Image (spheres, helix red, strand yellow):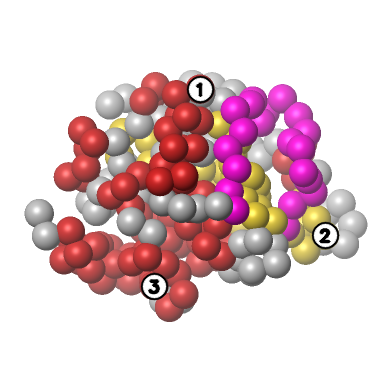
Amino acid sequence: MNIEQARFNMIEQQIRPWEVLDQGVLSLLSIVKREDFVPPAYRSMAFVDTQVPLPHGQSMLEPKIEARLLQELAVQRHERVLEIGAGSGYMAALLAHKAQHVTTVEIDPDLARMASENLKHAWVLNARVIEADASAGLVVDGPFDVIVLSGSVAEVPRSLLSQLKPGGRLTAIVGQLPVMHAVLMTRGDDAGHATVELFDTAAPRLIGFGEPSRFAF
């Protein structure tokens, strides 16, 4: 496989048509090597328009979904980010290139270890992996400017919304199969939140956030 050609095709044929036109995001997809965050058994799927299986029924989201969420969040260099569901560490790596610091929380020990090792090998120094159950309550180092849920939830827990700073943004994939919705929630100066529905999609359930996922690989 010609990796650079496959990467180019992913960006031009999958991601641009999904209204991802921010040049900073598109350039970042060339800088952060997605194939280095894919399990070796699925390396050939690194640039395919599909979810890539991870251990214990989890998965990496489709490249176009990751890119679109990154664009919608418009993360700034001074901002601090919380990610729920580290997976392989790829989304944390993308976020870390745009943010001041990323804290990514992963409940599964094997995935937490994988994400930590992948970020280390990619020389991502401003991201930290915490092995913990984020559904259980407060995460250290909050509040945050940006929160990313890298999986689906039945609804966004108030415990996470409370960790957003005023003006902070949160993205999540919300709802029930077969159709879920990616949403962008922005916190106002008070405790209120404005919600914008971005697009329809589907993703495996984050462990600990509602009923088990019906996805199987």
Front-most of 66 and 187?
A: 66
Q: Are marks 1 and 3 in contact (CB under 8 Å)?
A: no
State which quarter of the image contains the C terminus.
top left
Which amino acid type corresponds to the residue marked 2 in the rendered image? Pro
Is residue 166 among what the camera can see? yes
Stretch in magenta:
126-146
Comparing labels 2 and 1, the label whose residue is closer to the camera: 1
Whole-percent x, y for residue 10 in the image: 25, 62
Which amino acid type corresponds to the residue marked 3 in the rendered image? Ser
Q: Which residue is mark 3?
A: 27
Whichever of callouts 3 and 2 sits on the residue coming sooner in the sequence is: 3
Give the quarter of the image for residue 53.
Answer: top left
Whole-percent x, y for residue 78 in the image: 70, 67
Report whether 206 appears left or right of 103: left
Whole-percent x, y for residue 86 in the image: 51, 38
Q: Which residue is mark 2?
A: 166
Q: Which residue is mark 1?
A: 109
Q: Is residue 140 magenta?
A: yes
Numbered disc 2: secondary structure: strand
Give the quarter of the image for residue 154.
Answer: top right
In the displayed structure, 216 sits above or below 6; it is: above
Which amino acid type corresponds to the residue marked 1 in the rendered image? Pro
Report whether 151 appears left or right of 50: right
Disc 3: CA contacts within 10 A as few (<14), some (14-19) or many (>=20): few
Mark 1–mark 3 Cα distance, whole angstroms, equals: 32 Å
Q: Are marks 2 and 1 in contact (CB under 8 Å)?
A: no
